[in-house]
Amino acid sequence: MRSWRHGVARAVACAASGTLLVSCAGFGGAGSQGGDSINVLMVNNPQMTQLQSLTEEHFTAETGISVNFTVLPENEVRDRLSLDFANQAGQYDVATLSNYETPIYAGNGWLYPLDDYLASDEDYDAEDILPPLRESLTGEDGRIYAQPFYGESSFLMYRTDVFAEHGLVMPEQPTWHDVAELAAAVDEAEPDMSGICLRGLPGWGELLAPLTTVVNTFGGTWFTEDWEAALTSPEFIEATEFYVDLVREHGQAGAAQSGYAECLNNMVQGNTAMWYDATAGAGSLETEDSPVRGRIGYVPAPVERTESSGWLYTWAWGVQRSSDQPDAAWEFISWASSAEYERLVGEVYGWANVPAGKRASTYENPEYLQAAGAFAEVTRDAIADADPLDPGVQARPAPGVQFVGIPEFTELGTRVSQEISAAIAGQQSVRDALEASQGLAEEVAEEYRDE
């Protein structure tokens, strides 16, 4: 299997050819001012805004380290992250990055390795981090470059009360065709409720995350092992037509503009009977003030030709290599990723809100299991079963379940998602969307074949 290190090398060249590497600070760059202050860039999801609200009283008061947060939507975080870290400008000491960016950034020399901190910080218990996440945040040099704030896979969520009322039975391991039949049955029985909610919003981290898992289990892949683009293969077409037809026929209104947040809201408000998405969504469904709390069932991601099909993802904390505050940055990371912090969230916001999916001890904690018992085991198993190196039925040239682990995927995936979202909106056929997408993918594949 070809290594994705070739993509890392080209990412540096791409950056150098533009304006990203105008200056490259080494250690002691332009990071936060003063030894008691760090700058943190992070995504504006609910669990991270909770972290922001808890930091001053529970971290700064104890350590004396002030934390200056920049909190932005995901796409804006990624844009700012790539610019600042590629430049090694040092504006941010710490940033949230995923298991997609971490190996690539590590290979480029943009991240500070954390192994020495992990080895010397006995209170942190690095071995408690779930192995799939630990491995996904490790560079090709074997060093660890980030620590998870939370981890997730994907699963199917469904309204148990609605299913019981209409005599519908959810299999313990549903296939996608089972799901389609159940969605149609709900549509017929509940005129004011959609059968399922699926992402249709353009974005490589939006629409393409669930869709690519469907492609995998239907037998497709973005690229073959020898770097042939495969978006017009029979398997890729079948999976994409299935997904588009399912959301158009039995999905939510405005599907082409629905992402994670919109589907979560639909599920909370009782507007949909099923939702296939991130395991992290379960915490919001089971909060004390959720109108659907206790009425949701959770089963593994639907399959067709594979034994499992859930994705693997983590929002993790990485330290910019040029930061002049690595010790203070580690103090923050080790607190924000600790079992101690999980307990704090449980006590303040309720145990269902804990940023879980990263530590084995979380799934042995009676307080967490009492609050999250409906989804804890399914989540843990989904993360354990995810295989970024072999998520489908054929070998592939780069790692990733719901993404392709090469630098070009951010642009390629976003452009392909726009084509498929247009098909969901009824503006073109799936085959036309994939014909256009095949050309985009072939341009990327050709560069890798030439290497």
Image (cartoon, grey):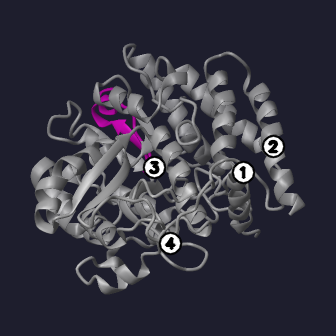
The reply to whether the magenta stretch includes residue 174 is: no
Q: Please name the amino acid that badge 4 sits on.
A: Glu
Of circles 3 and 4, the one toward us is 4
Q: Are marks 2 and 1 in contact (CB under 8 Å)?
A: yes
Mark 4 surroundings: few (<14), some (14-19) or many (≥20) residues within 10 A:
some
Q: Are marks 4 and 2 in contact (CB under 8 Å)?
A: no
Mark 2, secondary structure of its residue: loop
- In percent of width and height, residue 405 lies at 64, 57
Distance in Å between CA atoms under marks 4 and 1: 22 Å
Q: Which residues are magenta?
A: 155-172
Would you place residue 149 above or below residue 204 in this image?
below
- Residue 135 disc label: 4
The reply to whether the magenta stretch includes residue 157 is: yes
Q: Would you name the residue on which mark 1 appears?
A: 221
Q: Would you name the residue on which mark 3 appears?
A: 154
Distance in Å between CA atoms under marks 4 and 2: 31 Å
Mark 1 surroundings: few (<14), some (14-19) or many (≥20) residues within 10 A:
many
Task: Classify residue 428 as left or right of residue 153.
Answer: right
Q: Earlier in the sequence, mark 1 or mark 3?
A: 3
Q: Residue furthest right?
A: 450
Q: Are marks 4 and 1 in contact (CB under 8 Å)?
A: no
Q: Please name the amino acid that badge 1 sits on.
A: Thr
- In percent of width and height, residue 11 lies at 69, 57
> Residue placed at 50% from the left, 72% from the top?
135
Q: Quadrant of the C terminus?
A: bottom right
Q: Would you name the residue on which mark 2 appears?
A: 233
Q: Earlier in the sequence, mark 2 or mark 1?
A: 1
Q: Please name the amino acid that badge 2 sits on.
A: Ser
Mark 3 surroundings: few (<14), some (14-19) or many (≥20) residues within 10 A:
many
